[in-house]
Image (cartoon, rainbow, N blue to C red):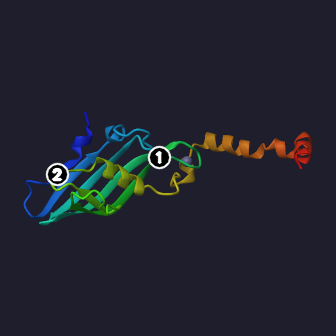
Amino acid sequence: MVKLTDFQITFSGLKLGNHKFDFQIEDAFFQLFDYAELSSGQVSAIILLQKKSNMLELDLQIKGSVTLACDTCTENYIESIEGNYKQIVKFSDVLETDETDEIIILPTNEHTLKLAHHLYEFIHLSLPSRRIHADRADCNQEMLEKLEELAFQEPEIADPRWSALQNLKK
Ligand SMILES: [Zn+2]
């Protein structure tokens, strides 16, 4: 069983300097999140962590593939994703601190960096804005035909009764 706690780094025992971590993300990972947009994928996350005396610097490399629904034909397809993200972890017990997208603030007595939500977010940031089969020939042709048929049938616009209604509204 995959758990959120499988995706964390206990940094307290690490020596100062560089460390490398490797997380493998599979389908079960996405089921840990409610309303997940993704349900299937094989993604590796390599994390280079530099421990300094007062902070941690992380370099995260995301690489793999996920299943997306094609915008053109609605059928699922496999998309390759890749991304590189930096995070800085600082420590403070002050509640109002300057946490941003790139800066994580942890309490000074914290030993563990929980990364599951961050990895989830980074995978989403790595998704393309246009989600379509790379080759239109790979699209579900039957679905394309149906969609085309629907596009041609827009009877309301030409229907005189509809025009009459539209005129009434004016
Ligand atoms: Zn398609």
Mark nearest the camera among 2 and 1 is 2
x and y percentages locating residue 23 in the rendered image: 24, 49
The mark nearer the N terminus, 2 or 1, is 1
Q: Of residues 58 and 45, which is closer to you in this image?
A: 58
Among the 4 quarters of the image, the one containing residue 52? bottom left
Q: Of residues 105 and 114, which is closer to you in this image?
A: 105
Residue kind at label 2, given as amino acid type = Glu
x and y percentages locating residue 45 in the rendered image: 27, 54
Q: Estimate the spatial distance between the alpha carbons at disc 2 and disc 1, rounded to whole Å.
A: 37 Å
Residue kind at label 1, given as amino acid type = Leu
Asked whether, in this view, residue 42 is left or right of residue 93, the answer is right
Number of residues whose C-alpha sits closer than 10 Å to that of mark 2, classed few (under 14), some (14–19) or many (20 or more): few
Mark 2: which secondary structure?
loop
Mark 1: which secondary structure?
strand
Q: Which residue position holds label 1?
A: 68
Q: If the image is split into quadrants, where does the N terminus sit?
A: top left
Residue at 89%, 42% (x, y): give it: 165
x and y percentages locating residue 24 in the rendered image: 26, 47
Asked whether, in this view, residue 152 is left or right of residue 114, the answer is right
Q: Is residue 155 above or below residue 89?
A: above
Q: Which residue position holds label 2?
A: 110
